[in-house]
Image: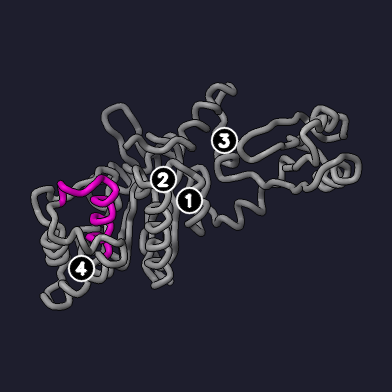
C-alpha cells in the first residue's frame, strides 16, 4: 500500500522561531491518523505544509503521490482550524458552489448529494437560509459537508470538534469514522487527547515542533504498564489511607475517574490488585492503563511539576469557541 502522505526531514521556521523541526512521517492510504499535542506544538503548521498553504524551509513532502497538494486538490477535503463559510450565501448555494470548485460537474448529482448530506446532518430545513443565520455549530456541519461532498481520497480535519455540543460531536465523529471505513485517509488534529483516543487507530504526538511518538493506539497501550488501580468502596466510611500500607501503593487520589491507588514504578501491579480485592471492603477494582494524556506527559515532562500541569491543562481544555 502506498503512502497518502510522505514527509522526510520537514522543517519550518518563522524568523527565529522553529515551528516544525525535521519531521519524518509516512501515512498509509486508508488509515486514520491523529496529530495530537498542546496548542502551539506545531500540528497546524504541519497540516498547512501538507496542504501547500505554507512551504517547508527544508525536507521532502508528497501528498497522494504528488509533490504538492495543489496537484491533488480535487482529491482532498480540508477543514481548517479557522472556520469559514460565505456568510451571505444560502446554504444550498454555498454547498453547490463548493462542489463545483472541487470538480463536481454533474448538476443533478451535485444537487442530490447536497440534499442527502443536509438530511444526514439534520439541516435540510436550513437549505434556503443564509449561512450567517445559522449557529456556529450548524455552520461547522455545513463546512464539514463541503469537505466531503466531492468524495475525497484524503480528509484533513484541524480541531473539527471545537465548539460543538456533545450530540453534534458524536454525530461528526460517526461521520468521520464512516469516511475512513469507506477507504478515505483521515488526518485528525486535536489538542484534546480523549478525542483522538476514541477515533484514531494511529497517533503522532508533536511537542515543540518535534515528533515525540508515532505508533498505533494498540502498541502505545501495550508498551505502557498500568500505573494505578481504580477501585470502588462498598461504603462511604471507607478508610482510603489504609491502602497506602500495601507494598507498591504510592498514594491515593480521587477524581472524576473515581478513587485511584497510584503505584510505584516498580510495583507488582497484579499483586497490588489482589491485595486490594482480598483485604478491603470494596465492590470492584481494576488496573488502569495510562491514557494518551498520561503517555504524553511522561514523554515531554518539563523541569518541574508545574510545567507538566500546564501541559496537562492544555490537553484537556476545549478550544475557546
Q: Nearer the viewer, residue 57 or 314?
A: 314
Specify start and end residues of the magenta stretch as a single range. Answer: 131-148
Task: Between label 4 and label 3, give the one nearer the viewer.
Answer: 4
Q: Say whether disc 2 or disc 3 marks the residue closer to the N-terminus.
A: 2
Residue 292 vs residue 48: left or right? Answer: right
**Which of 244/232 is in front?**
232
Choose top left, top right, bottom left or bottom right for residue 98: bottom left
Residue farthest toward the right in the current orientation of the protein: 279
Residue 196's disc is 1
- Using the numbered discs, state the Cα–Cα distance from disc 1 to disc 3 in whole angstroms: 16 Å
Q: Residues within 10 Å of mark 2 (few under 14, many from 20)?
A: many
Q: Position of residue 65 (x, y in %)?
A: 31, 66
Q: Read off the residue under disc 4.
A: 114
Q: Residue at x 39, y 71 (%)?
A: 183
250 or 120, which is in the foreground? 120
Check residue 133 for magenta coloring: yes
SS assignment at label 3: helix
Question: Mark 1 or 3, which is nearer the eye?
Answer: 1
Q: Which mark is residue 190?
A: 2
* Dominant secondary structure of the residues highlighted in magenta in the image: helix
Quadrant where the image shows the C terminus: top left
Image side of residue 123 versus residue 194, left or right: left
Quarter of the rendering occupied by the N terminus? bottom left
Image x and y of residue 275, in percent = 88, 42
Q: Which residue is mark 3?
A: 297
Whether pointer 1 and pointer 2 mark residues with C-beta atoms closer than 8 Å, the reply is: yes
The answer to whether the residues at label 4 and label 3 have Cβ atoms under 8 Å apart is no
Amino acid at each position: 500500500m502506498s503512502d497518502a502522505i510522505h514527509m522526510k526531514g520537514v522543517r519550518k521556521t518563522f524568523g527565529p522561531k522553529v515551528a516544525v523541526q525535521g519531521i519524518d512521517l509516512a501515512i498509509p492510504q486508508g488509515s486514520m491518523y491523529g496529530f495530537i499535542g498542546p496548542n502551539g506544538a506545531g500540528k497546524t503548521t504541519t497540516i498547512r505544509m501538507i496542504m501547500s498553504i505554507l512551504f517547508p524551509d527544508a525536507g521532502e513532502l508528497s501528498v497522494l503521490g504528488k509533490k504538492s497538494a495543489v496537484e491533488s486538490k480535487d482529491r482532498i477535503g480540508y477543514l481548517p482550524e479557522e472556520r469559514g463559510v460565505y456568510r451571505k450565501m444560502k446554504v444550498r448555494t454555498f454547498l453547490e458552489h463548493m462542489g463545483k470548485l472541487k470538480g463536481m460537474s454533474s448538476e443533478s448529482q451535485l444537487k442530490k448529494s447536497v440534499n442527502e448530506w443536509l438530511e444526514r446532518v439534520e439541516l435540510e430545513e436550513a437549505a434556503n437560509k443564509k449561512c450567517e443565520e445559522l449557529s456556529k455549530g450548524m455552520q461547522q456541519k455545513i463546512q464539514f459537508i463541503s469537505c466531503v461532498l466531492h468524495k475525497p481520497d484524503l480528509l484533513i480535519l484541524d480541531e473539527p470538534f471545537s465548539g460543538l455540543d456533545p450530540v453534534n460531536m458524536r454525530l461528526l465523529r460517526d461521520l468521520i469514522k464512516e469516511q475512513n471505513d469507506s477507504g478515505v485517509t483521515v488526518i485528525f488534529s486535536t489538542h484534546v487527547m480523549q478525542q483522538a483516543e476514541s477515533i484514531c487507530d494511529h497517533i503522532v504526538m508533536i511537542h515543540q515542533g518535534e515528533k515525540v511518538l508515532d505508533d498505533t493506539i494498540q502498541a502505545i497501550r501495550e508498551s505502557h504498564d498500568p500505573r494505578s488501580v481504580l477501585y470502588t468502596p462498598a461504603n462511604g466510611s471507607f478508610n482510603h489511607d489504609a491502602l497506602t500500607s500495601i507494598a507498591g501503593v504510592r498514594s491515593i487520589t480521587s477524581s472524576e475517574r473515581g478513587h485511584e491507588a497510584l503505584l510505584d514504578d516498580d510495583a507488582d501491579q497484579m499483586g497490588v490488585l489482589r491485595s486490594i480485592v482480598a483485604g478491603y471492603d470494596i465492590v470492584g477494582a481494576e488496573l488502569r492503563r495510562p491514557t494518551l494524556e498520561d503517555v504524553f506527559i511522561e514523554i515531554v515532562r518539563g523541569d518541574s511539576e508545574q510545567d507538566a500541569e500546564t501541559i496537562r491543562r492544555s490537553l484537556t481544555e476545549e478550544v475557546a469557541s
